[in-house]
C-alpha cells in the first residue's frame, strides 16, 4: 500500500481538485484573507502549502503586491493555476520537502491539507515550515480542530485516513512561537461548531527568536 503522500501526488490530488475546483473558483470570501486583513499583516513573501490552483495567492498578490509561491500535490491544479495567474509561482510537491531557501518567507499559509498528511511526515513538515519562515514571520493554519486527535476513513480512497487534531500544536510547543489569533469555525456553512467532527480552527502563530528564551529569572 502506498503512503498517503504518494497517493495524493499520483492520483488523488488531481481527483480532489476536479471535485472541488468549481467551488474554489466561485469563492467570494476567504477566511484566511479576511484574517490577514483583520490583523493588519503586510506580507512581502508568501508561501501557501496546499494552494490548489493558487486562487488565494492570486488575491493576496493583487492586494499586497507580494511575491507569492504555492505548493500542491495536484499537477492539474498547478498547471491550471500557472496558466491563469501569471504573477504567482506554483510547484507540485508536498510540505515535508520544500524547495525554497532558509528564511525566505514572512508568511506561510497551510491551507487545509495537514489532516491528509502521513503521520510520520509531521515532524518533517514542522521542520520545513520553520526553516523557510523568517524571524518575525507568521504561520496561518486552517484545519480541523477537535478536542483530541482521532482519525476517520477518507471516503474517496480505501486505506486513506483523515487525521483530525489541532495542528497549531506542531509549532506552539516551541517557545519561539506564540499564537496571536485563534478562531473556531464550522467546516460547512450548514454545520455547527458544537459538532466536534465539523469543527475547524483558524490559527495565526508568530515566530520570534528573541523572546522565546529570556534570561534566567531564578539566578542569584
Image (cartoon, rainbow, N blue to C red):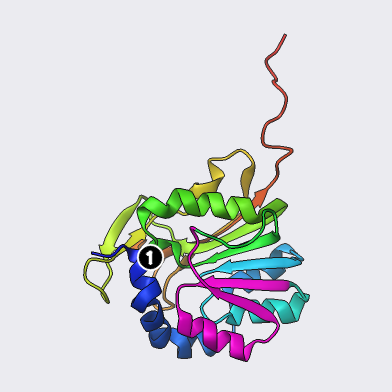
Give the camera-side residue of 139 and 36: 139
Q: Would you say residue 93 is visible in this rendering?
A: yes
Give the camera-side residue of 23 and 3: 3
Left or right, 84 with reference to 159: right
Residue 79 x %, y %: 53, 86
The residue shown at (40%, 82%) is: 14
Q: Does residue 93 show up magenta in the picture?
A: yes
Q: Is residue 21 above or below residue 114?
A: below
Tell me the quarter of the picture where residue 48 sits. bottom right
Q: Does residue 147 show up magenta in the picture?
A: no
Marks counted in the figure total: 1
Left or right, 18 with reference to 88: left
Residue occupied by mark 1 = 5
Q: Would you say residue 191 is visible in this rendering?
A: no
Residue 124 x %, y %: 48, 51
Q: Residues within 10 Å of mark 1 (few under 14, many from 20)?
A: some
Give the camera-side residue of 89 and 175: 89
Residue 138 x %, y %: 66, 56
The quarter in which the C terminus is drawn is top right
Q: Secondary structure at mark 1?
A: helix
Left or right, 59 with reference to 121: right
The quarter in which the N terminus is drawn is bottom left
Residue 120 x %, y %: 37, 51
The residue shown at (46%, 87%) is: 21
The residue shown at (64%, 87%) is: 85
Tell me the quarter of the picture where residue 196 sits. bottom left
Tell me the quarter of the picture where residue 139 sits. bottom right
Give the magenta range: 67-96
Amino acid at each position: 500500500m502506498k503512503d498517503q503522500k504518494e497517493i495524493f501526488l499520483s492520483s488523488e490530488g488531481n481527483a480532489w481538485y476536479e471535485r472541488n475546483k468549481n467551488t474554489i473558483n466561485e469563492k467570494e470570501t476567504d477566511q484566511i484573507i479576511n484574517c490577514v486583513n483583520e490583523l493588519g499583516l503586510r506580507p512581502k513573501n508568501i508561501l501557501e502549502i496546499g494552494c490548489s490552483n493558487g486562487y488565494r495567492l492570486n488575491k493576496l498578490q493583487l492586494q499586497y503586491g507580494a511575491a507569492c509561491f504555492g505548493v500542491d500535490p495536484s499537477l492539474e491544479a498547478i498547471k491550471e493555476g500557472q496558466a491563469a495567474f501569471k504573477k504567482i509561482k506554483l510547484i507540485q510537491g508536498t510540505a515535508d520537502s520544500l524547495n525554497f531557501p532558509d528564511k525566505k518567507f514572512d508568511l506561510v499559509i497551510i491551507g487545509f491539507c495537514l489532516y491528509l498528511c502521513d503521520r510520520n511526515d509531521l515532524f518533517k513538515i514542522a521542520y520545513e515550515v520553520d526553516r523557510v519562515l523568517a524571524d518575525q514571520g507568521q504561520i496561518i493554519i486552517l484545519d480541523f480542530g477537535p478536542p483530541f486527535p482521532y482519525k476517520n476513513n477518507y471516503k474517496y480512497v480505501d486505506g486513506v485516513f483523515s487525521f483530525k487534531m489541532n495542528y497549531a500544536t506542531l509549532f506552539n510547543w516551541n517557545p519561539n512561537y506564540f499564537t496571536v489569533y485563534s478562531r473556531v469555525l464550522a467546516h460547512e456553512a450548514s454545520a455547527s461548531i458544537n459538532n466536534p467532527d465539523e469543527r475547524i480552527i483558524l490559527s495565526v502563530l508568530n515566530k520570534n527568536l528573541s523572546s522565546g528564551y529570556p534570561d534566567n529569572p531564578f539566578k542569584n
